[in-house]
Image (spheres, helix red, strand yellow):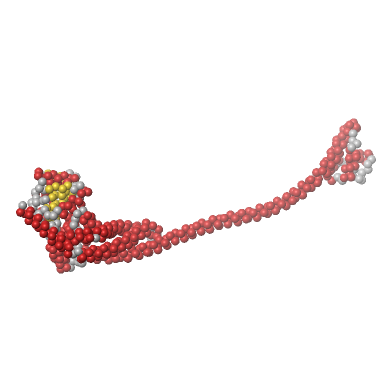
Amino acid sequence: MCIRDRSTQSTWEAKSELIQGGNILKRLHNLDYTKMSESTMKHLRTIIINFNFEEIRKADTACVSMANWCKAMYECFEAYKKVAPQQEKVDRIEAEYKVKMKEVKVMEDALEVIKQKLRELEAEHKKLSEEAKRLNDTKEQTTYKLNNAEKLIDLLGSEGERWTKTISRLKEEEKQLAGNIFLSAAFTSYIGPFTMKYRQRLMELWQKICIENKLRFSNDYSIIKTLGNQMEIKGWNIQGLPADHISVENGILATKAQRWPLMIDPEGQANKWIKNMEKANKLVAVKMTSEGNEYLKAIDQCVQAGRPLLLEDVQQEFDSALYPIFGRKTFKSEGGERISFGEKDIPYDRHFKLYLTSKHSNPHFLPEVCIMLNVINFAVTFDALEEQLLVEVIVKEKPELEEERTRRITEIATYQKQLRDIEVDILEKLTNTTEDTILTNEDLIISLEQSKRSSIEIAKNIKESSIIEQQVNKLSLIHISEPTRLGMISYAVFCLKKKKKKKK
């Protein structure tokens, strides 16, 4: 302190007075070595290097502390001289750091603003993406519905045109329904025993009655068109039923009428056809002329088992025990259906079928038999024989034509069945479809497409079938004389055989 304070004298008395003065400790405590001048510290150094602490301790122990304090101050100053530049550098760096940190803070604030903006943009992007996806889905759905709408307009347009024609046809058929049913009922009930000419006369008579009573019927009415099925008829022809008009009518009478058929069959054509037709159903064929009344046992077994039965060579009179079977006089008993047969009641199976054939060319059956059974005349007349032979001639001359005709009939029947099933399916789907779902109902569109294809194929096959029929008719005109000559020969041979049998 004395060195720093130049106003203080360097004499002992002056220094002693300074030390003994008040506030010495406070002044020493507040002394800042960092503010000492270089000259002061050099002067101090020249003093403290001569310190002899042992001598000082001997003189005064308090002075030892003062000497140590002075030495420490000098050493601190020297250390400070080394540290000060570094401290200044540190201070400068810290100042720069603070500046940079302020800049960083500004940048972080700016970054946070950017992040917030980015989050907002991402949220907006997500929202827009979802909206874009929704719009795209809507576009695809709308395009899908538009395509389906175009398909439906096209398909329903073509189907509508066809259905409109069908409705018109059905309405017309509805007006003719009563007359057609009357003619069909009369045909199946009464016309069986007669030949072709008498059948034509009876039909003309019945049609006249319909006209007089203002009962409309189809202009081209035919029992074959009304109750027949081309596919089924073609199957009958393959199974042995002749293809002439009257034989086909007899086939319908034998299979469609409510009464069991009793067939006048001197040539055996009906017998052969029935055996082939019912072969898959395990037909039982038995002659009524067999010994031991075997036919009664066969009837008993077939009625209970539900199997078809063919009674061959029936005579003009029948055992009255057969009448309940002929008349189907069943009754309910013991929880099931039964029928009287002889002196007992036997179970009756609904699958049972009965066919009867007689070789008599002109039998005289009892009236009650004619009431219970459907008498059908399968006897071959000259006209029927001529028609059968014409069919055979055409088959022999142009087998490929008949094969094509058969194929067309089969295809038309197949497509018509498919079309009926599809139409039912379409109507069911239209009934269960609402305005909201009609454009997304893929099954409906598929059904309509199938219906359109089937109707096109049917129209195509019908057109081609009409061409084939024209070819068949043209060929029939060419060969019209051949069946006549063959018929005359065959009929003559048949008549000779018949006379020979009578002589025997």
Q: Nearer the viewer, residue 464 or 126?
A: 464
Q: How many labels were placed on the picture?
A: 0
Side of 318 where 241 appears, left or right: right
Q: Position of residue 440 (x, y in %)?
A: 40, 58
**Residue 372 shows in this picture:** no
- Quarter-of-image position of residue 240: bottom left
Q: Nearer the viewer, residue 319 or 485?
A: 485
Side of 409 where 134 appears, left or right: right
Q: Nearer the viewer, residue 487 or 383?
A: 487
Q: Position of residue 201 (x, y in %)?
A: 13, 65
Please give the name of the residue rendered at 68% of the width and 52% of the height, measured from the top-left corner: 105
Position of 142 relative to 293 (above/below): below
**Residue 78 shows in this picture:** yes
| Residue found farthest to the left | 503
- Quarter-of-image position of residue 419: bottom left
Please give the name of the residue rendered at 78% of the width and 46% of the height, measured from the top-left corner: 87
Side of 371 where 402 appears, left or right: right
Please give the name of the residue rendered at 90% of the width and 32% of the height, measured from the top-left corner: 55
Please give the name of the residue rendered at 89% of the width and 44% of the height, measured from the top-left corner: 40
Q: Position of residue 390 (x, y in %)?
A: 19, 61
Position of 55 relative to 18 (above/below): above
Side of 59 where 471 appears, left or right: left
Q: Position of residue 242 (x, y in %)?
A: 18, 57
- Where does the N terminus fall, quadrant-wise? top right
